[in-house]
Image (cartoon, rainbow, N blue to C red):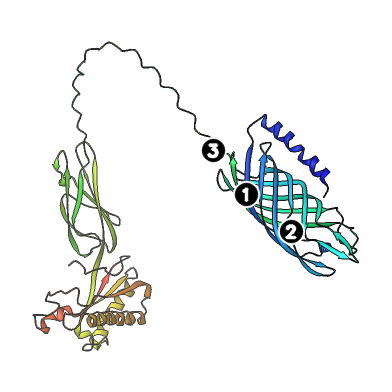
Amino acid sequence: MRKGSLVAFLGLIPTLAFSAHAQKPLAVEGGVFGQFTKMDDELSLDDVLSIGARLGIYVLPRLSVELDGHFGKTDWAAPGGVKSITYTPWSVKAVYALPLGERMRLLLGMGYQQNVYKNRIQETAGFVAGNEYEDAVTALVGLKLCLNEKWSLRGELPIDYNPSPNFNGSSVTLDGESTNWGIRIGISRMFRGGCYEGPPSPPPPPPAAAAPPAQPIQPIQTPPPTPAPVPVNAAPVASITSPASGASISGAFTFTGSCNDPEQGNISNSARWRSSRDGEIGTGASFSRALSTGAHTITMTCTDAPGLTGTATINVTSAELLFRLMEVSFEFNQATLTQAGRDTLNAVISTLQSRSDLRVAVEGHTDPYGRAEYNQGLSERRARTVVAYLTGGGIASNRIVDKGFGEQCLVLEDDHNIPKLPKDQHRVNRRVEIWSVGDGGAAAACRVR
């Protein structure tokens, strides 16, 4: 063991500690670790797993002096056979902690290490050769993660270079050199100082201002009464009561609505009605008017004396019934046309050919006898049969839409579950209707009659 180099290095520690202490109190860190050491092949030693401990003193805010040692067992391939020896190195080094973030530090260190190979002694021809102690230069690079202000995790890669002679070349001659490296993982705790500085504490609140001098009590003055607010005129409220929005209507239809003004009361007579297709269509609370076929947006507008208005809007479809095919137009309980049905549809084709502007909806209906599901299917099949006949007669399919209503839209009302009227009275319900609808399409629900 070379004591001179160790004594010289240790002699630096008080000097460093004294210079740092003049600036701030010393911080102390201690911890434990586990290490794997890859031994130089020249040493004829197996790799070592060891456990150890460290103690460090910060002589500057980022510079510490650390003393560490660890203990492990390994096998030595001695000339006389394998021997188990104890590996107990210790080191003292300066470690600089370079900040990588608030909690992360890059560790760079260098110092002196003594490798102790206990029982690494061999005898040759009565001569005892020992190589139990080796002086080394050690260095490390690692990372330190502060878990909180006291605890941290450390991972390091230490390396030591041994210029001291060892059993490299001859079994009895000490010559050569060696380099060992390792992987070290451990945990540390700050016993004095902190691992990192948390956010600064907020500054203390400013001192409370001195209370102002007491003021003489002034007599309470009663404020003048608040003038009554000027009433604000509110707009009238308009409402269309007939037809309902979404309804399909035909022929002259009576439109009704109401207008109520918060100040003037009922001002329905001021109502003006307008169609998106036909323009102005009427005035007042009620009027009758036939609309052009197609979809309409109807708007009723009421105006009070100061000129504020209220509006109500509905959407309706106006349709014109062109033809109605009764039950005699189809085979009984089927969707097959009879001769009478074909004759009627030939007249429809002639009308559509002479009036190329017409767009029609073919809508099938049944009576309430039988199951509702069956009646729905029968009405749809009969409507499709009519559409097929019309397109076969040269009418463009984009001018025709079809829909089946089953027993939903009875002309002659009766109980749908258990009809009370005889079947012959229900002939008016068994029908297919052809409506001129413009751009309105098939009715969404039963048409208003």
Q: Measure the C-alpha gap from mark 2 to mark 3.
A: 44 Å
CA distance separating discs 3 and 1: 25 Å
Q: State the residue position of label 2.
A: 87
In terms of sequence position, does the residue under pointer 3 or pointer 1 come before the other?
A: 1
* Mark 1, residue position: 31
Task: Name the spot of residue 323 as percent of width and height, x first.
Answer: 23, 75
Tag shown at residue 199: 3
Q: Position of residue 309 (x, y in %)?
A: 24, 43
| Label 3 SS | loop
For the C terminus, give its image quadrant.
bottom left
Residue flagged by tag 1: what amino acid is it?
A: Gly
Of residue 279 and residue 296, the one placed in the foreground of this image is: 296
Please tell me which residue is depicted at 17% across the width and 40% down the height of the picture.
262
Please report whichever mark, 2 or 1, sits nearer to the chain's N-terminal start.
Answer: 1
Residue 346 in view here: no
Q: Residues within 10 Å of mark 3 (few under 14, many from 20)?
A: few
**Residue 42's quadrant in the figure?**
bottom right
Q: Nearer the viewer, mark 2 or mark 3?
A: 2
- Report the mark closest to the observer, 3 or 1: 1
Q: Are marks 2 and 3 in contact (CB under 8 Å)?
A: no
Judge from the rendering whether residue 168 lies leftward or rightward of residue 448; answer left or right: right
Q: At x 62% / y 49%, what residue is drawn?
A: 31
Q: Earlier in the sequence, mark 2 or mark 3?
A: 2
* Amino acid identity at mark 2: Tyr
For badge 3, the amino acid type reads Pro
- The one of 37 and 321 positioned closer to us in this rendering: 37
- Residue lying at the far top of the rendered structure: 216
Question: Viewed as shown, does residue 33 lie left or right of 86?
Answer: left
